[in-house]
Image (cartoon, coloured by chain):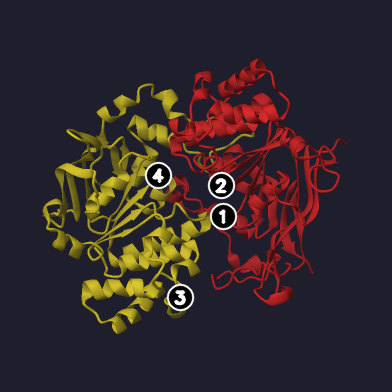
Amino acid sequence: MIAPLLDIRNLCLGVAAARSVHPLVKDLSFQIMPGEAYGLVGESGSGKSVTSLAVMGLLKKPLAVSGGEIKFKGENLLSLPKRAMRHLRGNRIAMIFQEPMTALNPLSTVGRQIAEMFVLHQGKGWNEASKLSVDALASVRVPNPDRRARNYPHQMSGGLRQRVMIAMALACNPDLLIADEPTTALDVTVQAEVLRLIKDLCKERGTAVLFISHDLGVIASVCQRVGVMYAGCLVEENDTRALFDDPRHDYTRGLLGALPRLGSRTQNNRQRLIDIDSIIADRSILTKTRFIAPRTLQEGRP
Amino acid sequence: MTAPLLQVEDLHVRFPISGGRLLGGGRRTLHAVNGISFSLAKGECLSIVGESGCGKSTTALSILGLQEPSEGAIRYRGQPLVGAGAPGRMKRAKVVQMVFQDPYASLNPRQTVRTALAAPLRLHGVTAASEIDARIEAVLKDVGLTPEQAGRYPHEFSGGQRQRIGIARALILEPEIVVLDEPVSALDVSIRAQIINLLLDLQEKRGLSYLMISHDLSVVEHMSDRVLVMFFGEIVEEGGWRAIFETPAHPYTRRLIAAIPDPDAALRLGRQTGSMDDFGRHAGYRFAFDGSSVPDIFTAPLPSALVEVAPGHRIRVARG
């Protein structure tokens, strides 16, 4: 039995008010094996993004963790000193954000921003680092990487910027990559390319991925295991195929039924989609039941 | 033969881009829409799909009269809808209305729902308070809101409810054509299903014609009768939804369909993808599809034509 790379146990976090804590994530537990792509799916406000911020140690007031632990390679990140956390962040755990334009520094060339990773985390000199940054751009299949390294973010298209973000995140060969809705802002064809890139690179380098999305199709095409979040709780977890073929939890069933699926229309008259609210009268009972299937995966590979 | 409800003929929209030199030297023109023709029948849902920048929104703006076409005609029941000899903005507003993509940006935060819905009625000569109230009540019921909610401001509603308000605003003047610009792409999965169901119900109940703009092909497949695939200002394929999704003929359409992250397809694979090698043969643009160049949108495309491959199913191929 291999130890999980990321082991989240009974994580609770919320908004700290004057005397109480308003919970956003309730008793969340899941594990990511080394090299595994794990997907967290849920609607807006289900707590998936704050979970990823908690892993990165980026929660800001009034958000705070109120219980549980986040173990990375056996070490509890929540009790780690700030300095040690800063050493991990970007180096061993890296993140790709949803909006590449706001995540990149507009005043600095992309080459310099990637080179910074090598200087900060690997102690390289700027000359060597900028050569490495060109290689990093080439590895994310940016055409003309040496010319592109001298570009500023505004000179690039959305797809290219997201590639730069991926190059930056993977620069130090992290063990865990957190991708928070990395393709939501992109066109379908560009999205398909970026997803393939993330998938291929992580497989090649054995990087584990925590993939966060509201798009079930995106999750299915990237992840081996999926957790479904609803109202701060993990309501169902299973291997991707099993989850889509045989959803056990009412909420997952509703979510899959609400999705217009390609090839599902068979007649000229249009069928109505399933409306979660019409099949589940009382949403508050949804978090009372959970279905967590045992893993059938070996070493994070299907 | 009766004229179709809406007919677009050889529509061109070009934008002048200054070349930065004095006296107009080096001025270039961006061809946003390049000779598009289509018609929309009563009660039909026609979708335009394509990537950002392909001209689908510009086409919609032209129909709404918000973007002057450079060439071409747009007719409503055989009469011009925009350009010379067209009725004014007020008349057009009773024919065609729009539902916008972002329900957060498209509602005025300082107006209550009642104010937003009453303004178009007043402008169109409905002044009796009782009639205004009755019509607002009816349209709110139709979109699944309660009349009591009319006194509230947009910030008091969720994203899905706001989109319902956006739909109510589009329907208050009882237009025959509604342009839907990515009507559900800003919404969560479960809310999306509710809005799609609502749009389908309203279409049936009121006999509306939809012109939907979207890049979400699974929604398009679910809702459309016919589909136009646009690529850099031109229609590259058009046909019934079944033809487009079951036997896509143009490599670009196949590429678009293959790119959709669909759970079933992702898990089972084996979906046919278009080879981009023969793309040049099909498209009117000089264009290498290895990512090294994009179509040159500043020069007119090479001659090409739409060729019928099956009844009602046409694709663009290079001519000559």
**B266 on left or right of A27:** right
Q: Are discs 1 and 2 less than 8 Å apart at CB?
A: yes
Chain hosting mark 1: B
Measuring 65% from the left and 15% from the top, which residue is drawn there? Answer: B130
Q: Are marks 2 and 3 on the same chain?
A: no
Q: Tell me the colour chain A is drawn in.
A: yellow
**A71 on left or right of B235:** left
**A229 on left or right of A3:** right
Q: Is residue B201 above or below residue A124?
A: above
Residue for badge 1 = B256
**Amino acid type, label 2:** Leu
Chain identity for the colour red used in the image: B
Residue for badge 3 = A148
Chain hosting mark 4: A
**Closer mark to the observer between disc 3 and disc 1:** 3
**Closer mark to the observer between disc 4 and disc 1:** 4
**Amino acid type, label 4:** His
Q: Is residue A39 visible?
A: yes
Mark 1 vs mark 2: which is more N-terminal? Answer: 2
Q: Quadrant of residue A10?
A: top left
Residue for badge 4 = A214
Q: Report the disc number at residue B217.
A: 2
- Which residue occupies the extreme bottom position in the image? A127
Q: Is residue B176 above or below residue A80?
A: above
**Closer mark to the observer between disc 4 and disc 3:** 3
Chain hosting mark 2: B
Residue B252 image point, x, y percent: 61, 59
Element at label 1: helix
Element at label 2: helix
**A96 on left or right of B163:** left
Camera-side residue of B133 and B41: B133
